Image (cartoon, rainbow, N blue to C red):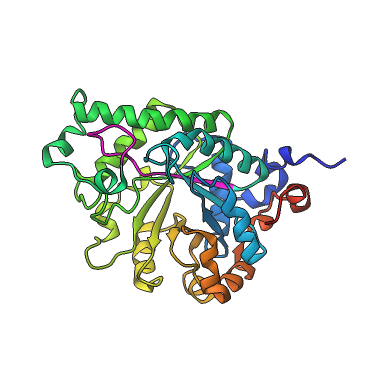
Amino acid sequence: MKLPHLLLALSFALINPQVFAQDVAPVNPNATPKAKELLNYIYSISGKNTLSGQHGVPLDGSKRLFEVFRHTKHYPAVFGQDFGFSPEGTWDGINFRQQIVDEAMRRHTEGFIITLMWHAVRPTEEEPVSFGESIQGELTEQEWKDLFIPGTEVHERWESQVDVIAWFLKQLHRADVPVLWRPYHEMNGPWFWWGDKKGEEGYKKLWIMLYERLVNFHGLNNLIWVWNANEVKPGVGAYKDYYPGNEYVDFLATDVYTEGFSQANYDELLSLAGDKPMALGEVGSLPSIEVLEAQPRWTWFMYWFEPHRLREQREISLSTYSSEQVLSFKELPWINVDEITSHWPVR
């Protein structure tokens, strides 16, 4: 008798133990077995394969997964979502957070790899907020200093905001869902309140404070920590100036929207990553096979926009998703694609 689809993703290692022949420890020494297994799987494909991925917005749930299939005849392997910041019912509404968690659990059970991010509200105000005024707002020099001092209003507000997100992440921890967690992204650019802050008292300190709050205080051991910068270009700083250190990072990633998958950008991140895996945390267009062959250390990419835009680069989309180098959902080693997709609508 075949296993029902709900059991297919319960243990990667039991289904395909040779995938995890190596044993790479996450930066969190108490990481869950599933988090370790996922990280080891990603190490095993580093330099050989790239996982396809698609970002989904809270308002749409998993709709974009089916749109990707409609345009490419493949489902992406990595499913991404953002905890959001905006008023109820809007594109990134904070009222969708429970739905995000439920969807992550559902898609993990089917076998998708889950990545989550958080456009965090500026810790001087309450949710919900507008993107331009808050997420892209500023902290004064004194507010930034107070952020790290327990007992100050800014620090206490920051803790409360983190604790709200931790409550949702804890549901995933209890459900044993490993998460590629990429908070406070694009920090080497100046457009977010946490951005463009160099030095030991800058962004590095914020990342470490978040790590300690989520791992040591909340005990979130299902997180794989993805440090996600932006492509270096005029006005965007070098990766190394914002890197918090190997002991706090499992994964290095960058977002690519304007520089066309620059080889210089890849080489710069690679020099910082060493043996750690690398990813394209967000892309505005799919990397071509030529790009992935020249830059083989990308272990996953996540297309940010609505999949109907893939029609604008139809040739690249089809060749990328059909390439032997790129792994789609059905090529994940723990997937029985007939069991999983038999009940899915193809729209």
Q: How many marks?
A: 0
Looking at this view, is 2 or 136 the one in front? 136
Q: Position of residue 134 (x, y in %)?
A: 26, 43
Could you say which quadrant of the image residue 33 lies in? top right
Q: Is residue 22 visible?
A: no
| 259 in the magenta segment | no
Q: Which residue corresponds to the image point at 57% horizontal and 73% vertical from the top-left?
A: 314
Q: Which residue corresponds to the image point at 60% horizontal and 58% vertical from the top-left?
A: 67
Q: Which residue corresponds to the image point at 64% horizontal and 57% vertical from the top-left?
A: 75
On screen, residue 136 above or below 233: above
Looking at this view, is 332 or 320 the one in front? 320
Q: Which residue corresponds to the image point at 67% horizontal and 58% vertical from the top-left?
A: 331
Could you say which quadrant of the image residue 125 lies in? top left
Residue farthest along the left direction in this orientation: 142
Residue farthest along the right direction in this orientation: 1
In-image side of 124 versus 162 (left or right): left
In-image side of 23 versus 118 (left or right): right
Q: Position of residue 143 (x, y in %)?
A: 15, 36
Chief SS of the magenta region: loop
Which portion, as a residue range, is magenta? 113-129
